[in-house]
Amino acid sequence: MPANTTIMYADIEGDGWFDIKYYVSTHMPLVAENWGPYGLLGWQVLKFVTPEGGEKPQYSIMALCTWETVDGAKRAVAALESKVVFDDIVNFSNVKPVHHYTAIVEGMWQK
């Protein structure tokens, strides 16, 4: 069953920082290179926005990674190749992310 992992970074405040340009141009290609063999199908980087008249979102940035299976995602995170991925975090942020695994139950995509 296909799966997603979400990696969410809280709203950046105070001494927190996040380099979105580095994240997209360097870190995520590193993720694809090292986790592709474990079934990573693709990724998206999303920026939370405040809706008109709404409350500020709890999170600032989210990466959505799509996988062939949840097991593949878990194997990738536990693999030796992940060290380079996790060691790279200090190059784009000092904010600790929240990480979730989700199984895709149903969906619809259009070309």
Image (cartoon, grey):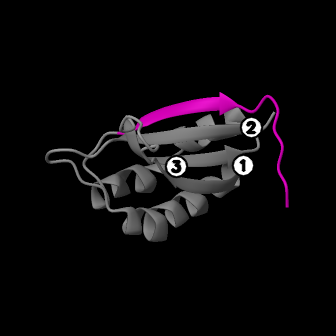
Amino acid type indicated by mark 1: Gly
> Where does the C terminus fall, quadrant-wise?
bottom right
Left or right of 4? Residue 69 is right
Please determine whether, in this image, residue 27 is positioned above or below residue 104.
Answer: below
Tell me which numbered mark, 1 or 2, is placed earlier along the sequence: 1
Look at mark 1 in the image and give the residue it sits on.
Answer: 39
Amino acid type indicated by mark 3: Ala
Q: Depth-wise, is mark 3 or mark 1 nearer the camera?
A: 3
Residue 50 screen position, x and y as percent = 42, 44
- Locate residue 105: give its quadrant: top right
* Disc 3: CA contacts within 10 A as few (<14), some (14-19) or many (>=20): many
Residue at 29% x, 53% y is: 93
Please determine whether, in this image, residue 36 is positioned above or below residue 73.
Answer: below
Q: Residue furthest left?
A: 15
Look at mark 3 in the image and give the residue it sits on.
Answer: 63
> What span is in magenta?
97-111
Residue 1 screen position, x and y as percent = 81, 33
* Disc 1: CA contacts within 10 A as few (<14), some (14-19) or many (>=20): many
Left or right of 41? Residue 55 is left
Report, in whole angstroms, how far the alpha carbon at label 3 lies from the one at label 2. 17 Å
- Which secondary structure is most common in the magenta stretch? loop
Label 1: element kind: loop
Of 88 and 45, nearer the camera is 45
Residue at 48% x, 49% y is: 82
Of 52 and 71, nearer the camera is 52
- Locate residue 59: give its quadrant: top left
Of 39 and 23, nearer the camera is 23
Residue at 41% x, 36% y is: 54
Look at mark 2 in the image and give the residue it sits on.
Answer: 69
